Image (cartoon, rainbow, N blue to C red):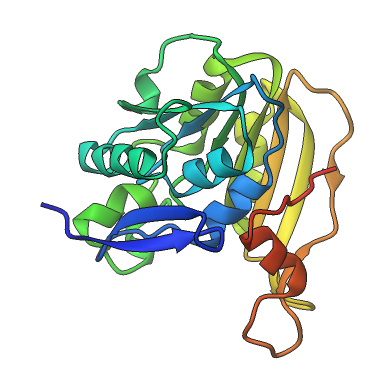
């Protein structure tokens, strides 16, 4: 039995049951959701939704858009379904229990988004609790598995959007180069003058436009602990433009 507590995202617009000791959705989920733009009637897919942090933020932001999310951990999928119901989004959001490596070719998505596990080498960090391991450790699902699953799901020239560690950018570009192009990269810095810790990367299936690196998003101004005004607006449900 996974012990959970209650938290909120998007200034309380999303209510989230999360594991007390496991991976907890926060700013990365909000930023990923804020990077998505879609018109009513479109269908978006998330790969590896966990308990639904990014998924529910995206569904709350994008009215009239349908969502399907895959999650291989049955306990996380059940919590995600509870969160979908408690947020009143069951008519537009479906949770599928299953491993993304088993997804058959099924073009159904106008866009795919994901927040893949961040670490490739379990020996490089303190061993996480069992409920954290699939959220933190790539294990048997490396990045090419994620991109191939996305390619099987995306209709036409739809988009795939990641948030990941900044130092994983070469791996992302390598994993997407065969079937995706038109790369847009948004670095995320903790403060001005500091190295980016995260990148948001959007690629387009079959895209051929030149790669673009956008101005960074800076989370904090100077030595302030509070988020910068632009980030506060995003946390309240605003968009993080990738144009």
The structure residue drawn at horizontal position 63% and vertical position 37%, both measured from the top left corner, is 62
The structure residue drawn at horizontal position 57% and vertical position 35%, both measured from the top left corner, is 113
Task: Return the residue found at the far front.
Answer: 88
With respect to residue 140, does 163 lie above or below?
Answer: below
Q: Along the horizontal axis of the image, is 10 left or right of 178?
A: left
> Residue 64 appears at what percent x and percent y?
61, 27
- Is residue 168 visible in the rendered image? The answer is no
Task: Return the residue found at the far right.
Answer: 210
The structure residue drawn at horizontal position 34% and vertical position 37%, both measured from the top left corner, is 140
The structure residue drawn at horizontal position 68% and vertical position 68%, both measured from the top left corner, is 232
> Residue 173 appears at what percent x and percent y?
67, 38
With respect to residue 201, does 91 lie above or below?
Answer: above
Q: Along the horizontal axis of the image, is 103 left or right of 233?
A: left
With respect to residue 62, does 99 lie above or below?
Answer: above
The C terminus - image quarter: top right
Task: Locate residue 41: give its quadrant.
Answer: top right
Please state which of residues 108 and 85 is positioned toward the viewer in this rendering: 85
Task: Return the residue found at the far bottom.
Answer: 223
> Residue 8 appears at what percent x and percent y?
44, 61
């Amino acid at each position: 039995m996974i012990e959970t507590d209650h938290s909120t995202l998007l200034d309380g617009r999303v209510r989230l049951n999360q594991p007390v000791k496991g991976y907890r959705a926060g700013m990365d989920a909000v930023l990923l959701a804020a990077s998505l733009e879609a018109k009513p009637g479109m269908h978006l897919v998330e790969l590896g939704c966990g308990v639904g942090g990014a998924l529910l933020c995206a569904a709350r932001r994008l009215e009239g858009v349908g969502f399907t999310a895959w999650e291989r951990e049955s306990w996380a999928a059940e919590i995600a379904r509870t969160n979908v119901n408690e947020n009143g989004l069951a008519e537009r959001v479906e949770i599928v229990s299953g491993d993304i490596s088993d997804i058959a070719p099924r073009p159904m998505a106008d866009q795919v988004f994901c927040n893949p596990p961040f670490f490739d080498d379990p020996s490089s960090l303190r061993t996480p609790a069992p409920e954290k391991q699939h959220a933190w450790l790539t294990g048997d699902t490396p990045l090419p598995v994620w991109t191939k699953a996305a390619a099987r799901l995306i209709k036409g020239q739809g988009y795939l959007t990641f948030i990941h560690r900044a130092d994983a950018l070469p791996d992302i570009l390598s994993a997407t180069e065969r079937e995706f192009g038109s790369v847009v990269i948004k670095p995320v810095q903790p403060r001005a003058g500091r190295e980016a810790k995260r990148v948001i990367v959007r690629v387009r299936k079959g895209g051929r436009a030149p790669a673009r690196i956008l101005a960074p998003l800076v989370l904090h101004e100077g030595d302030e602990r509070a988020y910068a005004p632009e980030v506060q607006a995003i946390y309240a449900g605003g968009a993080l433009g990738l144009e």
